[in-house]
Image (cartoon, rainbow, N blue to C red):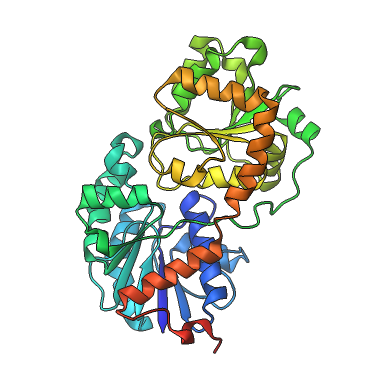
Amino acid sequence: MHVGFNLIFLVPGETGGMEVAAREQIRAIAELAPGLALTAFVNREAAAHVAEGGELLPPGVAVWPLPIRARARWQWALGEQMLLPIAAGRARLDLMHSLGSTAPALSRCVRLTTIHDLIYARYPEAHAGMLAAGMRVLVPLAARRSGRVIADSQSTKRDIEELIGIGSERIDVVPLGIGSVQRQEPMPEQELRRRFDLGERRLLLSLSAKRPHKNLLALIEALERIEAGRRPLLIVPGYRTWLEEQLLQRARSLGVAEDLRLLGWLSAQELEGLWSASAGFIFPSLYEGFGLPVLEAMARGVPVACSTASSLPEVAGDAAILFDPRDVDAIAGAVEALIWDERLRERLRGAGRARAALFSWRRTAELTLASYARALGLGGVPGSWLEGP
């Protein structure tokens, strides 16, 4: 059995949560099902990364480069629709798994697509220009032309049913996993504090893209409602977007600019240092297909507060402070409890680690293989997939 992975979307180091999910899921599938032949179809950027010795795929997964530059959205879209089906035919795939919410409309092999979220439909302002237009066309097309669809959560499954019109019987819910979270030694805390001018205050981390649906404006407003002496220093790492200047302006107008650090991309050592130094992690998002950063925090024993929106209660369970993301006072109250209630903080540390342990990449792989079997019309996962060659 030959399975292909459509990774045309993946630019190493630039694709965020979808990159983490693709890397970890493929690694787990390769380990769990050594009897499968696996091929990853990649763009020029990913092929160059692999050629330079970058770790993208596990041993045993063949790499099939395509002449597509994924940073050019039009090349990504056209290449996926025109070049990928040809390559899949030449590779003689039995099944193609597209892991980035879009997929070829035509192909001779069985198709299965993972749709991580429908942000483009729920919050269209999160995307702009050609990307927004493309998502509105290509995501529904992928869902309708695929034999089966995988959703990261029950929340996303409901969105696919409601907004695209796919029947429940064709959608499999496969939650993401969390593995070994600390891959680098953390930067020592005092060095980290000096480098980013963090002083000696308690740190509140919010690891999220600077986009409207992440609800960072409301989080900044919540900071202003906390007594100055009890405010933590809010740290928001990540790539810069058009929203960043608006966030800074809001912080200045509210008098909390000194309580905010909008950091750019960080090294793995710096980010690990922030996880270690943070008193808490907050995730006020209005929409998430899954919310992997919540599990990242929990697995590290960092107390978590997150919103009640979309999939987040499914992920957090009772191991986080939950709040209404549209209620600024509720966000402020959650921040104060997260930072200053020591008894609650201790409970959240233990509950978070236990909650994160329920989400493994092996379980993700098991459920994905079961979805493959359904797509191929098999009664269950064949034993030959689980046995080595």
Above or below residue 222? Residue 124 is below
Q: Quadrant of residue 127?
A: top left
Q: Quadrant of the C terminus?
A: bottom right
State the residue at coordinates (55%, 66%): 362
Closest to the observer, 3 or 57:
3
Closest to the observer, 254 or 281:
281
Where residue 40 sits in the image (x, y, percent)?
Answer: 45, 71
Q: Residue furthest bottom?
A: 389
Q: Quadrant of the N terminus?
A: bottom left
**One can see residue 48 in this view:** no
**One can see residue 242 in this view:** yes
- Left or right, 25 with respect to 172, comes to right
Number of marks in the rendered image:
0
Q: Quadrant of residue 6?
A: bottom left
Closest to the observer, 293 or 253:
293
State the residue at coordinates (30%, 43%): 120
Where residue 77 sits in the image (x, y, percent)?
Answer: 30, 58
Where residue 273 sits in the image (x, y, percent)?
Answer: 72, 40
Above or below residue 174? Residue 155 is above
State the residue at coordinates (41%, 82%): 2
Closest to the observer, 58 or 329:
329
Where residue 212 sits in the image (x, y, percent)?
Answer: 39, 31
